[in-house]
Image (cartoon, grey):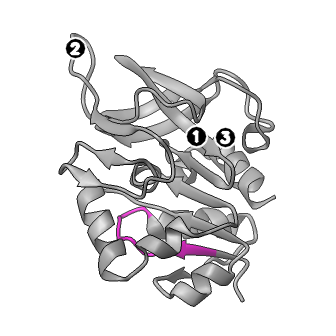
C-alpha cells in the first residue's frame, strides 16, 4: 500500500509535484487504480489545464465517485482544487461538489493581467494545521485564469484584481490554488503539513 498517491487526472505539473514530494522523502505513485487510491493514507489531485478535461479524465477512469467517497486527507492542487467545487465556468462543467462554490474567470481590470501568473501574497483567514509555519503575507506562486471568489472554506485568500480562495479546507478535503511544487519553502511547508 502506498502512503501517498497522486490521482492521474492529466496536467503538466504531475512530474513536478512528484519531485517536490521526493524532496520531502515521499515516493507517491501516479495512478488511476481505484483500490490503490482508496487504500492510500493521503491522496493528492494535481492538475494544470482546464476543469473540463480533468473531470472528463476522472469520469473516463471511473474515479468521480471514488474521489467523492474518500475519507482520508485529500489535497487538490490548482485545477485539482477547482474541481473539488460544484461547478466551473471554464467549459461549464459539473465538478466533484465536495466544496460549495463556483469557479469563475478572474475579471479583467485596468492593470490586472489574466492569466494571474507569478508570486503573490497569501492572506490568512483562519488558523489551520495546513498553514502551520506559513506566515500571513507569505508569497506563493500562481498560474491560473479561473478561481473561486467567495468560499466559506477558504483558510487563506489572495488578491489579483479580486480576492479569491488560495487555500481551502473542509474536513478531510483541502486544496491550494497556488502551486506548492513551485512555491519554494512555503509550498514545501504546505505539503509537509498535509503529509502530517
Asked if residue 168 is positioned above or below residue 172 in the image, the reply reads above
Report, in whole angstroms, how far the alpha carbon at label 3 lies from the one at label 1: 16 Å
Name the quarter where the C terminus is drawn.
bottom right
Q: Which residue is mark 1?
A: 168
Q: Is residue 172 at all visible to an observer of this figure?
A: yes
Disc 1 is placed on an element classified as strand
User: As rendered, which of 102 and 53 lies closer to the eye?
Assistant: 102
Q: Which residue is mark 3?
A: 186
**146 or 190: nearer the viewer:** 146
Using the image as rendered, state which of residue 151 and residue 192 is in the foreground.
151
How many numbered marks appear? 3
Which of pointers 3 and 2 indicates the residue nearer the eye?
2
Query: Which segment is the magenta one?
Result: 5-13
Please name which of the two marks, 3 or 1, marks the residue nearer to the observer: 1
Q: Secondary structure at mark 3?
A: helix
Q: Which mark is residue 109?
A: 2
Cα distance in 3D space between marks 3 and 2: 28 Å
Q: Is residue 92 magenta?
A: no
Disc 3 crowd, CA 10 A, few/some/many (<14, 14-19, 20+): many
Q: Along the polypeptide, which appears first: circle 3 or circle 1? A: 1
Indicate the secondary structure of the residue bearing disc 2: loop
Identify the residue at image location x=46%, y=68%.
Answer: 14
- Choose the circle earlier in sequence order: 3 or 2: 2
Amino acid at each position: 500500500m502506498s502512503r501517498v498517491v497522486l490521482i492521474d487526472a492529466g496536467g503538466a505539473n504531475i512530474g513536478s509535484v512528484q519531485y517536490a514530494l521526493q524532496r520531502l522523502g515521499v515516493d507517491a505513485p501516479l495512478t488511476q487504480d481505484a483500490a490503490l487510491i482508496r487504500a492510500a493514507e493521503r491522496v493528492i489531485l494535481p492538475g494544470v489545464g482546464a476543469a473540463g478535461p480533468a473531470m472528463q479524465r476522472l469520469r473516463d477512469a471511473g474515479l468521480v465517485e471514488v474521489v467523492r467517497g474518500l475519507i482520508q486527507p485529500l489535497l487538490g492542487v490548482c485545477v485539482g482544487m477547482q474541481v473539488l467545487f460544484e461547478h466551473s465556468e471554464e467549459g461549464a462543467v459539473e465538478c466533484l461538489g465536495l466544496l460549495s462554490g463556483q469557479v469563475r474567470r478572474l475579471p479583467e481590470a485596468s492593470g490586472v493581467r489574466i492569466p494571474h501568473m507569478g508570486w503573490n501574497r497569501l492572506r490568512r483567514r483562519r488558523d489551520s494545521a495546513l498553514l502551520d509555519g506559513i506566515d500571513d503575507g507569505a508569497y506563493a506562486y500562481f498560474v491560473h485564469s479561473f478561481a473561486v471568489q467567495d468560499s466559506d472554506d477558504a483558510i487563506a485568500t489572495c488578491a489579483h484584481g479580486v480576492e479569491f480562495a488560495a487555500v481551502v479546507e473542509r474536513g478531510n478535503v483541502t486544496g491550494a490554488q497556488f502551486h506548492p511544487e513551485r512555491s519554494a519553502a512555503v509550498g514545501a511547508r504546505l505539503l509537509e503539513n498535509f503529509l502530517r
